[in-house]
Image (tube, grey):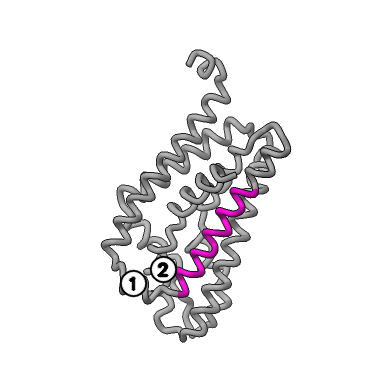
Amino acid sequence: MFDSFLLAFTALFSIVNPLAMALIFSQVTADSSPRDRAKLAGLVSLYSAIVMLTALWAGAYVLNFFGVSMAALRIAGGFVVAERAWALLTAPERHEARKQEQAAPTSDNDRLAESAFFPMTIPFTTGPGTISVAIALGSTRPTRGAGGLMEFFIGMSGAALAIAALIWLSYRSADRIVAFLGPTRVRVLTRLFAFLLFCVGVQILLTGVLDAFPLLSQKG
C-alpha cells in the first residue's frame, strides 16, 4: 500500500506541481477578494480530486473496454508520462506560461466560482497531462489477488487525495508561497520532481514492454 502511495504521490505531484501553480494562481486571482480566492481554492481542490480519482479508478478499464491491452496501455502511458516529464525538465517556464494563458480569467468581472472547473481545474490544475499520468498509474494495478488490488487502490487514492489537499493548501496560501519561495526556487523544485516523474514514466514503459514480451524477463 505504501509503495503504491509513494509511486502515485511522486508522479502526480510532479505533473500537478501545486507549488509552481500557486504562483500562477496568485497572479490570475490578484483582483479577487481573499474570501473569493479561498472559496475558489476549495472548489478547485475538490474537482481535482474527482478528476484524479476517476482517471485512476476507471481510466484503464475504459481503455480496456475498447480493446486496448494492459501492456499497450502501460507502454503508451509510460511514454506519455516520460515525455511530459522531459518537457517539464527542459522548459518548466514554457509549461507555466501555457498554464497561465489557459487559466486567464474571463472578462466582465464574472464570478470566479463559475470558472472553478473550467479552466481553473481543467486544464490549469489537472489537465491532460495529469489525466494521462493517473491512467498510466492505474494501469499498473496487480492482476491477481483481491487483497493486493484493494491495497493498490487505497494507496493510489490516498495519494490523489493528498495531492488535492496540497492543491487546496497551496492555492489558499498562494501569496505566502510566492513571497517565501519566489520563481527561481519553484523552478528548481519543478526540475527535481520532473526528473523523478521521468524515472516513473520509464519504469511504467519498461513494465509494459516486459508484459508484452515475457521472454525478455525470463532471459534476465
Q: Are marks 2 and 1 in contact (CB under 8 Å)?
A: yes
For residue 165: magenta? yes
**Labelled disc at residue 214:** none
* Sequence-wise first label, 2 or 1: 2
Q: Residue at x 46, y 71 (%)?
A: 171
Q: Which residues are magenta?
A: 154-172
Which residue is at a point 46% across and 49% down the rendered structure image? 10
Residue at 32%, 61% in the rendered image: 186
**Residue identified by numbered label 2:** 22
**Whole-number angstrom distance, CA of label 2 to CA of label 1:** 8 Å
Q: Residue furthest top?
A: 219
Residue 80 falls within the magenta-colored stretch:
no
In the rendering, which numbered label is found on residue 178?
Answer: 1
How many numbered circles does the render carry?
A: 2
State the image coordinates of residue 184 (x, y, percent, origin top left): 26, 62
| Quadrant holding the N terminus | top right
Residue type highlighted by circle 1? Val
The image shows residue 74 at horizontal and vertical percentages of 55, 35
Quarter occupied by residue 158: bottom right
Q: Amino acid at mark 2?
A: Ala
Above or below residue 94? Residue 28 is below
Q: Does 68 sit left or right of 84 as displayed? A: right
* Percent x, y of residue 48: 57, 62
Badge 2: residue crowd in 10 Å (few <14, some 14–19, many ≥20) = many
Q: Which element carries disc 1, helix, strand or loop?
A: helix
* 177 left or right of 70 in image: left
Residue, far right: 146
Instruction: Tell which of 102 and 152 is nearer to you.
Output: 152
Secondary element at image label 2:
helix
